[in-house]
Image (cartoon, rainbow, N blue to C red):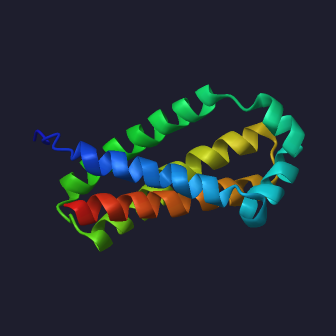
Amino acid sequence: MMMAWDVNYLAALVAAVAAMAIGTIYYMPAVAGRAWMKAIGKTPAQLKESNRPSLYVVSAILAFLQAIVMAAVIGWSGDVSLGGGALIGFLLWLGLAIPVISNTFIFEGRMLINHVISGGYYLISFVVMGGIIGAWG
């Protein structure tokens, strides 16, 4: 059985922009930023020193790639709706993102808080991206 690659690239782009906006808010010091910096052992000054535009370009490309694949999966599921897209975003987070993040962090010897902070961001962004893509239908 051949699955059609029928992706709404505009919906995927909007979803990727939403993921970037969520990350901007989520990693603010007042939200999860302070805990994240402590968990990775960095100060605001150290992060500012290593902050380059190329990091955001790569992050945006990766978010767009995630959204494109998510759009294909939502289309294949046949449940192209806000709720269906959000559910598929959740399932992709649970079955793919969390195992990948956790496996990496386990072998890097990172603390549990790293899992929780990164996992929280991806949970929110995947559910929102899926909802946007599904609602765009």
On screen, 135 above or below 76? below
On screen, 76 above or below 61? below
On screen, 65 above or below 23? above
**Residue 13 seen in the figure:** yes
Pick whichever, 71 or 31, lies toward us: 31
Q: What residue sits 43% from the left and 63% below the top?
A: 128
Residue 91, x across and y down, in percent: 42, 61
Q: What residue sits 32% from the left and 47% below the top?
A: 12
Residue 71, x across and y down, in percent: 28, 50
Image quadrant holding the C terminus, namely: bottom left
> Residue 87 appears in which quarter of the rendering?
bottom left
Q: Which residue appears farthest toward the bottom when viewing the image?
A: 83
> Residue 31 appears in which quarter of the rendering?
bottom right
**Residue 41 seen in the figure:** no
Q: What residue sits 22% from the left and 58% below the top?
A: 77
Residue 28, x across and y down, in percent: 72, 57
